[in-house]
Image (tube, coloured by chain):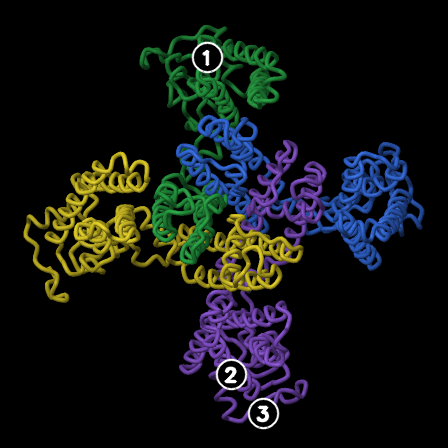
Chain colours: A yellow, B green, C blue, D purple
Amino acid sequence: MNSDREGAARVSTPAQRKVAEIIFGTETFWGKWFDLILIGAIITSVMVIFLDSVPALHELHKKAYFELEWFFTVFFTIEYGTRIWCSPNRRKYVFSIWGVVDLLAILPTYVALFLPEAAPLLIVRLLRTIRIFRVLRLFKLMSHANRLGAELRKTLPILVVYFAAMLIITVIFGCIIYVLEGPNNGFNSIPSSIYWAIVTFTTVGYGDVVPITVAGRAVAAAGMLLGFLSIAVPTGIIAAAIMEKPRNRNGSSVGTSRNYEKNCRNCARAGHDKDADYCKFCGSPL
Amino acid sequence: MNSDREGAARVSTPAQRKVAEIIFGTETFWGKWFDLILIGAIITSVMVIFLDSVPALHELHKKAYFELEWFFTVFFTIEYGTRIWCSPNRRKYVFSIWGVVDLLAILPTYVALFLPEAAPLLIVRLLRTIRIFRVLRLFKLMSHANRLGAELRKTLPILVVYFAAMLIITVIFGCIIYVLEGPNNGFNSIPSSIYWAIVTFTTVGYGDVVPITVAGRAVAAAGMLLGFLSIAVPTGIIAAAIMEKPRNRNGSSVGTSRNYEKNCRNCARAGHDKDADYCKFCGSPL
Amino acid sequence: MNSDREGAARVSTPAQRKVAEIIFGTETFWGKWFDLILIGAIITSVMVIFLDSVPALHELHKKAYFELEWFFTVFFTIEYGTRIWCSPNRRKYVFSIWGVVDLLAILPTYVALFLPEAAPLLIVRLLRTIRIFRVLRLFKLMSHANRLGAELRKTLPILVVYFAAMLIITVIFGCIIYVLEGPNNGFNSIPSSIYWAIVTFTTVGYGDVVPITVAGRAVAAAGMLLGFLSIAVPTGIIAAAIMEKPRNRNGSSVGTSRNYEKNCRNCARAGHDKDADYCKFCGSPL
Amino acid sequence: MNSDREGAARVSTPAQRKVAEIIFGTETFWGKWFDLILIGAIITSVMVIFLDSVPALHELHKKAYFELEWFFTVFFTIEYGTRIWCSPNRRKYVFSIWGVVDLLAILPTYVALFLPEAAPLLIVRLLRTIRIFRVLRLFKLMSHANRLGAELRKTLPILVVYFAAMLIITVIFGCIIYVLEGPNNGFNSIPSSIYWAIVTFTTVGYGDVVPITVAGRAVAAAGMLLGFLSIAVPTGIIAAAIMEKPRNRNGSSVGTSRNYEKNCRNCARAGHDKDADYCKFCGSPL
């Protein structure tokens, strides 16, 4: 046990270790069951928030939704407490991304308790909506997504550059259309013209703001065709990245390959070296 | 003949076997002709239902459509009966997907007979529409699609994960826009905000629900650009899957390859091993 | 000279051969100049028809457009006559696709001469528009496109199957939405519901017909996500086809490769074997 | 130093060379800091123009925006002057694309000084908008984009041909819909019908112009499906181009590869041969 790492990693008791295996792990029998129950609870509680936000349903089942919400909040609070209790490195877990997400999933319900009856609607709305972020916890439970994500992360630098180049082009298109279409018709400021350019370039095409002059339509048509062709570039980059993988596997320069199946039991992050004994993100034993 | 398998596979008479070859097979001369006639009958009968659903045409040719519909129903009923009669494994055929589709293609017309004159419009509409599912039978007749489908099936697990990840992202986007845009303008509940997020993320962009605040438009633009880039990922995955194939063909690790040209004569499913003698789905001999 | 082939291929005089080299060929100095002039004439004449169709401009420059149109018609008529005169196989040329397109480019102007003053608008409109088909002649002048087209043609069978499968899926989606959305809101017949399904599935999303019920929106969202993922399949197929090419070039099984640079001087079709001396489509010498 | 090349490349003083290294170079410590400050100044000044174009904000902060604009104009003027002063080949820099962009970024503010109070709105708008072109300078600072651009440039000829073919197809679709939909409903001229065809073909789908007849909708649906499939072709071409790269790297026929990391200090263009000592675009030493 590496209790010297930042003084936070402690020696776990056998009970703590047993529970950690169930709660953080994904390989044991009970760990799999716990994950399934958790996924079910997250999806159900999010569904309740969805339905509660529909004005007509809110009026009808107000009380049921309120009780269900408290049931799930208590469930997630117990789970959050257990996670802290059995975590080999408590501070690391609490301040990790998933620790914050776990807290955000329960906090708003408690905060709402202290809210005055006449709280502004925006605050109520915000608190109710933040609870939905517990859907993010599903990402943690997708080990497959971790693997795909690791492949996609390699293409990130080039995609960011491409993204920036695309933004510059939409800015230019937005400005040209702003001059051509005049102040009428929704093109009354450069930001909203750029908004239109993004809507057009990504081939979304709402139709709420639309060019009506001949010159404006010609520029719009050029932008559409450019956007249409632009989809090809990130696709090519990502397809090339995904396809390169099997070639490397057969090649000789494999080195120490990563293990994406095994998640850390404390912080749930993957991508450790195959011969690693400790999590490289939070220092707890694998 | 494997009459021991579930007690359902019987010894076919020569006549039954001859007819089964024509009806289920796609390789003999008469089998090909039967398939062409069947395709023609399916497409024509679907066209009749299409035209019958147009109110103006329904008034004009009511009687002709009714008679044509009965002609096709009788034709498909005879075909369905013959299929059952000559099938080496009747129970398996009747409860297979294609058996159910074959039944659904004829059932509604008979059910409509027993419907009172004043039946609710929804039921009439539903019965009329279910008959269109006979168009699904065309899938069975596409052997090429079976092969492409077999390749695409390999990419299914990763695509389902990606699909789930995309849904989570649209939920988050829907919630952010729900808070930012307020109750006006179609964003009055979280489900309809998520509907908007899916419409935007997939670059469909109906324009029936559209953000009007500055913050809402900024979030919408971010969602569009993200959706625009997201098309690249499944494309890369599928392109990689399709391209990997020829490499394997030339390689040494071929093993027992599948035979996608030969469909089972009973359940019409393909993908059996090349050395298989019995269908692995319904147990009838190949 | 193969004058025995259908009795149509004649022995050309030296003058005819010289002119044929300029008009049908794309490699000699004068042949290139002739092509450039032809491209210019086609684009200019199409632009004139464009402008003539704008009501405001038609009123202003009626006479100028009329005279320009006759100038181009006479020019294309002389060119069409010369092509027939110098063609080694006249019948083949006249009845080839490009021969018909060449004729369609000039015929409407002559037909309009014999049209009564009070001709129905649709006929006038149709004649005016058919002349635009002369833009198709540009395809003949694109030798690069011929090469790309030859690669894409290999993927055609699988794409047709995919296309058919997509159509069946849109039919199913159209029918489900037809039942769910009821007769209101543009979903009043199955054909228009299928039209909506195609608009949604291809991510065009006009927004003229839009689901308003909860169930309809859920089905629509499923259709959008399916359509969004569907773009990936043809892309993968075509990308694989394009990428396979260089592998073959380095490989050993090259065989007699095709020559896409050299067009037939008579029918302008490419794709002959490298060692071919006669056009395989019309029999005239290469 | 090659003072003989066009008589423009001069012998730089040590001070000029030192400053040129900071201003044009991207590798030294101060060169990197200068680039970061420049990027910040460009983005901030563009943001100011954005906000200034919003009528409500313009009224509120008129004076602040005016002063900020002059601050940035003076900053960019000093930078422009310094660039000319320390450039080894002044004429080449001033008439290079980036030299013109640098000038366009400052000119409009000065021109606006001499503008009468009652200048037409279009001119004011145009001048204000041209200043946004300074965002183009960001392209120069993206060395990664240069590399991606070099790869994409190889696919340009085939993409231009594909682009032209797509334009011809949209022209044909526009004309067919023009005849079918008649003069009503926005299809009143061929150019606006072609605009609709481009909007549909690129899957943008504004919905401002929409077919209403059955025949028109059928043609529109065909155009959508064709456009949907068309995205696949450029994607395949670009993906093939990007993926070919690593194969060449391992191959033997590498030859003199290009150096995209090293930009010319005078004209900022990349892509010189690895053994080049002088910039091949402006003749200044590398």
Give the x, y percent position of residue C192: 56, 30
Q: Are marks 2 and 1 in contact (CB under 8 Å)?
A: no
Q: Which residue is under mark 1? A: B118
Comes first in the chain, label 2 or label 3: 3
Q: Using the image, name the chain to which the residue with label 1 belongs.
A: B
Relative horizontal placement of residue B55, taking residue A89 as reference (left or right):
right
Describe the element under mark 1 as helix, strand or loop.
loop
| Residue B144 visible in the snapshot | no
Question: Looking at the picture, which amino acid does disc 1 mark?
Answer: Ala
Give the x, y percent position of residue D86: 54, 88
Front-lying residue, B235 or D286: B235
Residue occupying the point 15% across, 44% down = A74
Residue occupying the point 68% across, 40% down = D184
Q: Are marks 1 and 3 in contact (CB under 8 Å)?
A: no
Q: Using the image, name the chain to which the residue with label 3 belongs.
A: D
Q: Which residue is under mark 3? A: D11
Describe the element under mark 2 as helix, strand or loop.
helix
Label annotation for residue D74: 2
User: Is the residue C221 above or below the residue D6 in the image?
Assistant: above
**Numbered disc in front, either 2 or 3:** 2
User: Is the residue D12 above or below the residue D197 in the image?
Assistant: below
Q: Is the C terminus of chain D in the top left, top right, bottom left or bottom right quadrant?
A: bottom right
**Numbered disc in front, either 1 or 3:** 1
Q: Using the image, name the chain to which the residue with label 2 belongs.
A: D
Give the x, y percent position of residue C147: 66, 48
Front-lying residue, D269 or D225: D225
**In which quadrant of the rendered view does residue A72 lie?**
top left
Q: Are marks 2 and 1 on the same chain?
A: no
Q: Is the N terminus of chain D in the top left, top right, bottom left or bottom right quadrant?
A: bottom right
Q: Mark 1, residues whose alpha carbon is within 10 Å: few (<14), some, or many (≥20)?
A: few
Question: Looking at the picture, which amino acid does disc 3 mark?
Answer: Val
Front-lying residue, B214 or D77: B214
